[in-house]
Image (tube, grey):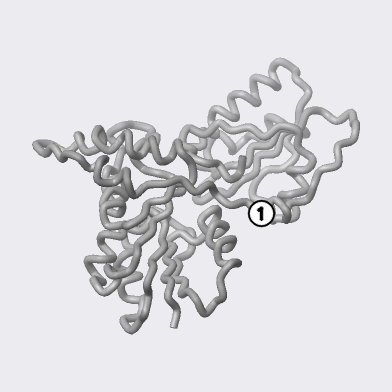
């Protein structure tokens, strides 16, 4: 029977890429993988523990549990105390303690609290960058100060010894190499991010329109994955940039690599980024 339990409530994008890369090193008999598709991460975070508590078998011999911080590990262990005996490892692709919101009143503190509770339930806490780790630890106290009439102490001191950095594995050997040749094409800009407000697409559009206004000769590919509706700032971008817009929207892997190889500069406008696999 499998000794490793792997749980991913948001099995897509960099979350899927991480696991797929790791699992190449294991025989399928060594692990059990339980996932949910990468849709509506807010709901995956809210209800993932309940879902997995019912789908993970009761009869098992797991010695280690690996999951991402999307899962509320504390809830899962509360619902399935038989999993408490596992060595519990949580991987942070990003943290919610300094997530940018349009207005402060919109902040849903529960996601940050879930991550703190998950860390308290874990034996080992792994971050994809040092900035991710330090920004999480540095913000615990101020984040919890939002709670009225409660002052929680020493949480950072409890968690910090369990924390370490493991940079995101990227299989560069699988990515085609670019052959540099002289050409007369305009500079090709690549913006390869999710179409969400924390990646600041409005700032991208403002910048591109300013370059256009100044008659700068450039091309741009706006790539990445859209999870819901098209951002309002993107709705007329094709009409405004015309032939300067080379690619617009999600591309398959082969097309994506071709676009990257044709690009000259990759740009980021993100307000919330901890590793940036796309970059």
Q: Is residue 216 above or below residue 58?
A: above
Between 53 and 213, the one nearer to me in the picture: 53
Identify the residue at horizontal 35%, vertical 64% (top origin).
87
Residue furthest to the top in view is 214
Residue furthest to the front in view is 161
Residue for badge 1: 171
Between 231 and 128, the one nearer to me in the picture: 128
Instruction: Indicate the quadrant containing the N terminus: top left, top right, bottom left or bottom right.
Output: bottom left
Instruction: Indicate the quadrant containing the C terminus: top left, top right, bottom left or bottom right.
Output: top right
Identify the residue at horizontal 48%, vertical 74% (top origin).
31
Identify the residue at horizontal 11%, vertical 39% (top origin).
150
Quarter holding residue 50: bottom left
Residue 276, horizontal then vertical, whole percent: 55, 41
Quarter holding residue 147: top left
Identify the residue at horizontal 35%, vertical 39% (top origin).
136
Label 1 neighbour load within 10 Å: few <14, some 14-19, many 20+: few
Q: Secondary structure at mark 1?
A: loop
Quarter holding residue 254: bottom right
- Looking at the image, residue 193 sits to the left or right of residue 240; the answer is left
Between 55 and 127, the one nearer to me in the picture: 127
Please count the marks in the image: 1
Residue 169, horizontal then vertical, whole percent: 58, 52
Residue 248, horizontal then vertical, whole percent: 68, 43
Residue 93, horizontal then vertical, whole percent: 46, 48
- Looking at the image, residue 149 sits to the left or right of residue 232; the answer is left
């Amino acid at each position: 029977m499998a000794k490793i339990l792997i749980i991913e409530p948001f099995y897509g994008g960099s979350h899927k890429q991480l696991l797929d890369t790791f699992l190449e090193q294991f025989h399928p008999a060594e692990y059990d993988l339980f996932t949910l598709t990468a849709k509506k991460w807010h709901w995956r975070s809210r209800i993932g523990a309940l879902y997995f508590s019912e789908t993970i078998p009761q009869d098992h011999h797991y010695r280690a549990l690996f999951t991402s911080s999307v899962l509320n590990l504390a809830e899962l262990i509360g619902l399935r105390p038989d999993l408490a005996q596992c060595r519990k490892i949580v991987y942070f692709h990003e943290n919610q303690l300094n997530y940018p919101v349009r207005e402060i009143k919109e902040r849903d503190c529960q996601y940050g609290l879930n991550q703190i509770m998950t860390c308290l339930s874990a034996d080992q806490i792994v971050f994809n960058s040092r900035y991710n780790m330090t920004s999480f630890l540095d913000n615990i106290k101020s984040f919890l100060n939002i709670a009225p009439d409660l002052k929680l102490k020493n949480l950072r001191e409890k968690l910090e010894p369990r924390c370490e950095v493991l940079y995101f594995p990227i299989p560069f050997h699988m990515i085609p190499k670019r052959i540099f040749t002289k050409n007369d094409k305009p500079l090709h800009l690549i913006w390869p991010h999710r179409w969400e407000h924390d990646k600041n697409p409005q700032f991208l559009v403002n910048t591109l329109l300013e370059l256009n206004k100044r008659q700068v000769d450039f091309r741009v590919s706006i790539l990445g994955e859209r999870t819901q509706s098209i951002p309002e700032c993107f709705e007329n971008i094709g009409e405004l940039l015309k032939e300067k817009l080379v690619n617009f929207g999600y591309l398959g892997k082969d097309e994506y690599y071709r676009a990257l190889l044709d690009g000259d500069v990759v740009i980021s406008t993100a307000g919330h980024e901890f590793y940036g696999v796309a970059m």
